[in-house]
Image (cartoon, grey):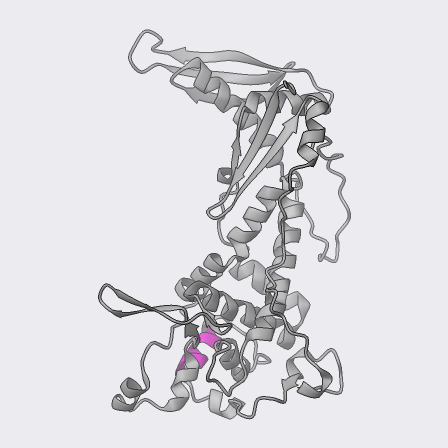
Amino acid sequence: MNHGPRISFVTRSSTTRFLRHISISPLSKVVAQSKPKPVHKFSYEKSNNVRMNGDDLETPDSATDFGDYIRSSYGLKVSEEEAQKIPAILALHARLNLSPKFKKSTLVRALTSRMKNNDYADNHQMALFGSNMLSYYTTEYLITTYPRLPIGILKAATDAFVGDFSLHDVGKNVWGIEEDWSTNLEKYLSKEPKLFRFGRLRYDRQAKEVEAGITKYSISSETSLSTATAYANSVRAIVAGVFAADGERETKDFIYKHVLSRNVDISSMLEFEEPGKLLARLLKTKSMEAPTIRLISETGRQSSSPTFIVGCFSGDNLLGEGQGTSLKEARIRSCVSALKAFYLYKPLEPRVPSDDSFKPLFVDEGESFY
């Protein structure tokens, strides 16, 4: 059965691929409804988030003093006086320009992952809270900066900012957090104080290299983590510590400075199948004239390496330009350029909902054929 022409819209990231079919024929809509739709999750909160009972927590007098909640099940804690003696903690605190309200002992906890044999407070709950803060500020930043981004691209861009591998790069290569690789025997032989181990990232590794070319994989457990996840959790925990010590405004500035200031090429995430048909459908929904392709300039048509520059027009409005070694290639590039110009539209001086001077901005009615 012929359901009419079909337009496929494809978005890609390093780990995911989202495919949408937009049909012009009304019959194909019935077929599309039977297919499962992709699920897009914006929060990086893990499913093993355990709800704490009141008996397990020492609650402060003020319920909003998040930094003063203490889990009573931990008998061993690194005090603030002990944390002041760890050079790596002092260096990291100064490197991140953290406020004096951010305790050194909180930074020690942020570098301690949940492990099998560990009696000290870990960063598990802090990482869960910090992931929600990162997801919120990143999502509102992308939605207000690029209000026309499709949901698949929005998810991929969010992952590019606050995913495990991105935060691993922030924690290791930008902040300079080190891992605790040395064994107890090596620490004993080097006469290193036991307190110094808390200045490095500590976690149960899923895999580690025993010898050159030999990798040892640990038995799967709830506490074993990959290197990327362990580093990402430490970054999320530090974000939660900033919120507990300094409040929401300082946390937002901290995230913008260390995470959202990174360069992410969102344009490279857009990829289209049959861009000409998609552009024609898009212009029709916007009550604009159908796209026309016009040759702007050319050189070397009879040579082995010609170059053509064409423009994609809607009436007298130039939507995009494309360059190629053939007219077909240049035409496709011009349609892709016009589509990217639409989806990557940025308002002048966008404001996010968390700003004090935020005012809602109407962009357009959205894409009805999605």
x, y percent for residue 366 = 72, 35
**How far across and how far down the image is residue 129, in percent?**
63, 69
For this orientation, the residue located farthest to the top is: 302
Across the whole image, how many numbered discs are drawn on residues? 0
Asked whether 16 or 269 is in front, the reply is: 16
- 346 within the magenta span: no
Which residues are drawn in magenta?
A: 87-94
Image location (x, y in percent) of residue 143: 66, 47
Quadrant containing the C terminus is top right
Whether 352 is drawn above or below 82: the answer is: above
Q: On the image, which quarter does residue 214 sit in?
A: bottom left
Residue 260: percent from left, percent from top: 55, 55
Q: Main secondary structure of the magenta part?
A: helix
Is 93 one of the magenta-colored residues?
yes
Residue 359, placed above or below residue 363: below
User: What residue do we see at 57% from left, 58% from top?
Assistant: 256
Furthest residue in direction left, as rendered: 212
Left of 359 or right of it: where is 58?
A: left
Q: Nearer the viewer, residue 3 or 134?
A: 3
234 lies above or below 347: below
Q: Nearer the viewer, residue 307 or 122?
A: 122
Residue 171: quadrant of the picture: bottom left
Query: With 311 as the anchor, is 370 left or right in this view?
Result: right
Q: Residue at x 67, y 33 (%)?
A: 32
